[in-house]
Image (tube, helix red, strand yellow):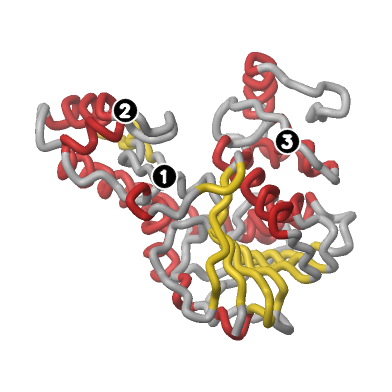
Amino acid sequence: MLVTNKLHPMISAIETSRHLAAIAAKPEDTRTVYEEAAVHFIQGTTTTVLDDQHSTVGSIIRGYSHGSKVRYYRALTNAKRALNLAPKVVYAPGHGNDVSHCEVFYNADKIINLDVDPHAVELMRKLYTDTDNIESHVGYAETFKPDYPVDLLIVFGAAFDLNKLDLNEIIAKNGYFISNPFSEDKYKELEFLGRYDENGLIPNDEEHYRTVLTDKELLRKGTTSRTRFASYADVLKIVYKLTGQTSGLIKPYNELRDLAIAQVIQRSKERHQSLEYKRQLEEAHIEYFDYNEDHYRELAKHLGTKTVTLSLDNREFELKPLPDVTRRYNSACVYKKVS
């Protein structure tokens, strides 16, 4: 049973590790929905205490959550407080299994979740089965349309082309749009209000939102990036093990990442086409969802910012993202529709 922070205000890293190991060792068909959520949410053993939790689901990310999701939760909380956001209808396409927006805007009249992964959708439905104001749908953001314009659109780390969304149609007048800065797009119909991180408002300095391009820049900036990014030493070690090179690291590193991502995409395709996957959908009473090639292309773009594992000659190497000072998975960019 998942331990909540009502009993334990802080869970130690050792306790977390043991708890997660026990859950992971369980057969999938014997896990409770909350244990399954823990497996989905936790990508490490980071322990973090969150404030303002308002549901049993919130206890899951309270002590057991991937660092980036915790920081994004806090960024959303800071934006909500600073701007006094009180949306009645929230729409979050491409949310995956992240519950941050549901927890922060828990008191909205309606929260509409949308994702192409039926398993993520089914998980959200189970987690919020007793919550009347949250609904979750399977579908594509490019084709799904809410019944009427929403007060708040949230797009966080989504694996789809944001340009294909008609923001003018989706967002109501004086409504808000929140995203992490994964896109360089400029929205003419929206006024940029600011970028919020886990500590509060951060400056809009585009110079700090750039991926390194050379070994020299990697050496200089990589040493100051947060630990979730690959350091110069990380990249050097990986490239040297696989190629023997000790200079000109950026090009081979990117090529290795492309290869690793291609392997991940191929495994995803094979899984979606398997009879076992279709059986799981039927058991969850979900209509089979047909993934087309566009889905995998968007997934490849999304994985371009993630840590992936490369298997080569029966050896595995962890390939981390190049140091990107953007903190793009730690902050919330807030826009307001004024037209």
Query: What label sits on residue 180 in the rendered view?
Result: none
Say which residue label 1 marks: 306
Dot 1: within a 10 Å radius of its alpha carbon, few (fewer than 14), some, or many (20 or more) residues?
some
Q: In the figure, is residue 307 to the left or right of 144?
A: left
Displayed quadrant of residue 325: top left
Residue at x-position 77% and y-position 39%: 34
Q: Nearer the viewer, residue 82 or 325?
A: 82
**Looking at the picture, which amino acid does disc 3 mark?**
Leu
Q: First in sequence: mark 2 or mark 1?
A: 2
Tag in front: 3 or 1: 3
**Looking at the picture, which amino acid does disc 1 mark?**
Lys
Dot 3: within a 10 Å radius of its alpha carbon, few (fewer than 14), some, or many (20 or more) residues?
some
Residue at x-position 84% and y-position 42%: 56
Q: Is residue 177 above or below residue 37?
A: below
Q: First in sequence: mark 3 or mark 1?
A: 3
What secondary structure is marked by label 3? loop
What secondary structure is marked by label 2? loop
Q: In the figure, is residue 59 to the left or right of 174?
A: right
Specify the quadrant that holds the N terminus: top right
Cα gap from disc 3 to disc 1, whole angstroms? 24 Å
Specify the quadrant that holds the C terminus: bottom right
Q: Do the CB atoms of the residues marked 3 and 2 lie less than 8 Å apart?
A: no
Displayed quadrant of residue 92: bottom right
Say which residue label 3 marks: 50
Displayed quadrant of residue 219: top left
Tag in front: 2 or 1: 2
The picture places residue 199, in percent across and down from the top left corner, at 60, 39
Query: What label sits on residue 223 in the rendered view?
Result: 2
Dot 2: within a 10 Å radius of its alpha carbon, few (fewer than 14), some, or many (20 or more) residues?
some
